[in-house]
């Protein structure tokens, strides 16, 4: 009798710790003597029967995966539509699952990935195929519903807070005769969690960063420029952190790059720091520098949060445990049980309550003037960036990351070109 297998796939933008989740999944499955297949490039690999046999990897390689950034099996930005609209794709997916005796499907990603896992679970039920689908949380945006925080966010938050603090010291040193204003752009389309994390760099409102701009508050250009001018005159320089997704009162993205969109249908953003810097220079006449960290903020494994690293592995292990208990259409989420001392646990949540829902920052986390975070936000954010995750270095002074062999599984079905 053929033994059933588990299929794991990564989706969306990768993080500094998504491979730690993968290591958690593979390690836990091996403990139960379950073979793990990985889809190359997310759901695309599943559709094209482009699968990887993780049993061909050594234990040492899987352990090293836990401290390697990027996405070891490749990711993608592909969103499946409804069961009716994307029927052919879903039926093909089911054919591949059947051909490789997949009994459990784990999809590691954000909102759209949770939606895909939920739809696949519905498809299997409709065709009476015994499949357990589990969503596995990941996103640096920290915008998944139900979970207290999202694996990937804590490390990106730590990178942001550290980078802003270090840059602020540089600006302070040069402000007398050079740069007066520094603008840092953080990821965050609709939720300002990463920009808020930058606020941890300054222990008091008088410290840098002096101005934070969030998607949850409408961007008022006149008020922003007046605040910059006020801070420079009071402090001698001004550090600004802006979410890429800040909007004007009429809903227009300040950084709208010509109305483009990614494969998920989301606005393709980037460039708000350059825009704000230009406005400051043109209106106030101050010398300005700006930075767009882009992929750096989500890939910086060298400064990962130990808390985030532990949580990333924990959700991977829990996802396998839930799958083996036939807990269908659920996601392991992080539940905070205490702020001080910080304590957390993993619990299952229905995918229906996660998919297509978005968690933005509560009003109580944003200062009344809209330019900073409150003590409540600090209490929430501070534990998430605590600790340093161990990372081996080589004699060349660089981190020792692993590249898996990614041995392909032999294809059984005819090629699929749809």
Image: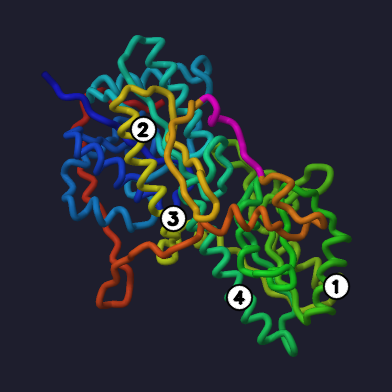
Which secondary structure is most common in the magenta stretch?
Answer: loop
Q: CA distance from mark 4 to mark 1?
A: 20 Å
Residue in the picture at 36% in, 33% down = 106
Residue in the picture at 46% in, 46% down = 344
Disc 3 packing (10 Å; few <14; some 14–19; many ≥20): many
Q: Which mark is residue 106?
A: 2
Residue in the picture at 60% in, 32% down = 357
Taking the image as shown, residue 137 lies to the left or right of residue 400, namely right
User: Of callouts 1 and 2, which one flags the residue occurring earlier in the amino acid sequence?
Assistant: 2
Disc 1 packing (10 Å; few <14; some 14–19; many ≥20): some
Query: Which one is in front, 105 or 292?
Result: 105
Residue wearing tag 4: 167
How many callouts does the rendering have?
4
Residue wearing tag 1: 230
Q: Would you place residue 82 above or below residue 230 in this image?
A: above
Query: Which one is in front, 261 or 383?
Result: 383
| Nearest-to-viewer mark from 3 and 2 | 3
Taking the image as shown, residue 54 lies to the left or right of residue 194, namely left
Q: Would you place residue 4 above or below residue 234 in this image?
A: above
Taking the image as shown, residue 112 lies to the left or right of residue 65, namely right
- Report helix, strand or loop for mark 1: helix
Q: CA distance from mark 4 to mark 2?
A: 40 Å
Q: Which residues are magenta?
A: 352-360
Q: Which mark is residue 307?
A: 3
């Amino acid at each position: 009798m053929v033994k059933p297998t588990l299929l794991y796939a990564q989706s969306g933008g990768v993080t500094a710790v998504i491979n730690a989740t993968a290591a958690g999944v593979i390690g836990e499955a091996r403990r139960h003597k379950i073979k793990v297949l990985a889809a190359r490039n997310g759901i695309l690999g599943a559709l094209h029967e482009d699968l990887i046999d993780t049993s061909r990897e050594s234990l040492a390689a899987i352990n090293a995966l836990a401290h390697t950034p990027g996405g070891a099996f490749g990711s993608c930005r592909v969103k499946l539509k409804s069961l009716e609209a994307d029927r052919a794709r879903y039926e093909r997916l089911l054919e591949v699952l059947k051909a490789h005796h997949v009994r459990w499907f784990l999809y590691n990603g954000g909102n759209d990935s949770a939606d895909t896992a939920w739809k696949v679970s519905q498809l299997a039920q409709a065709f009476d195929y015994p499949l357990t689908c589990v969503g596995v949380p990941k996103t640096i945006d920290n915008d998944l519903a139900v979970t207290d925080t999202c694996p990937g966010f804590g490390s990106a938050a730590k990178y942001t807070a550290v980078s802003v603090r270090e840059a602020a010291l540089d600006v302070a040193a040069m402000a007398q005769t050079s740069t007066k204003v520094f603008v840092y752009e953080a990821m965050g389309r609709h939720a300002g969690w990463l920009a808020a994390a930058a606020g941890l760099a300054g222990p008091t409102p008088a410290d840098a960063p002096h101005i934070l701009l969030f998607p949850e508050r409408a961007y008022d250009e006149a008020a922003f420029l007046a605040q910059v001018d006020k801070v420079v005159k009071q402090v001698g320089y001004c550090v600004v952190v802006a979410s890429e997704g800040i909007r004007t009162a009429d809903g227009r993205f300040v950084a709208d790059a010509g109305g483009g969109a990614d494969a998920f249908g989301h606005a393709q953003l980037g460039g708000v720091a350059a825009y704000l810097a230009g406005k400051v220079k043109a209106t106030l006449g101050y010398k300005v520098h700006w930075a767009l960290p882009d992929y750096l903020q989500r890939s910086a494994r060298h400064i990962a949060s130990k808390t985030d690293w532990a949580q990333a592995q924990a959700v991977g292990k829990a996802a396998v445990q839930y799958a083996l208990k036939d807990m269908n259409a659920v996601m392991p989420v992080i539940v905070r049980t205490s702020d001080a001392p910080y304590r957390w646990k993993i619990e299952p949540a229905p995918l229906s309550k996660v998919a297509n829902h978005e968690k933005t920052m509560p009003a109580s986390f944003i200062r009344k003037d809209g330019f900073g975070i409150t003590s409540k936000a600090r209490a929430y954010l501070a534990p998430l960036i605590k600790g340093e995750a161990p990372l081996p270095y080589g004699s060349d002074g660089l981190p020792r990351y692993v590249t898996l062999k990614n041995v392909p599984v032999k294809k059984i079905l005819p090629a699929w070109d749809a």
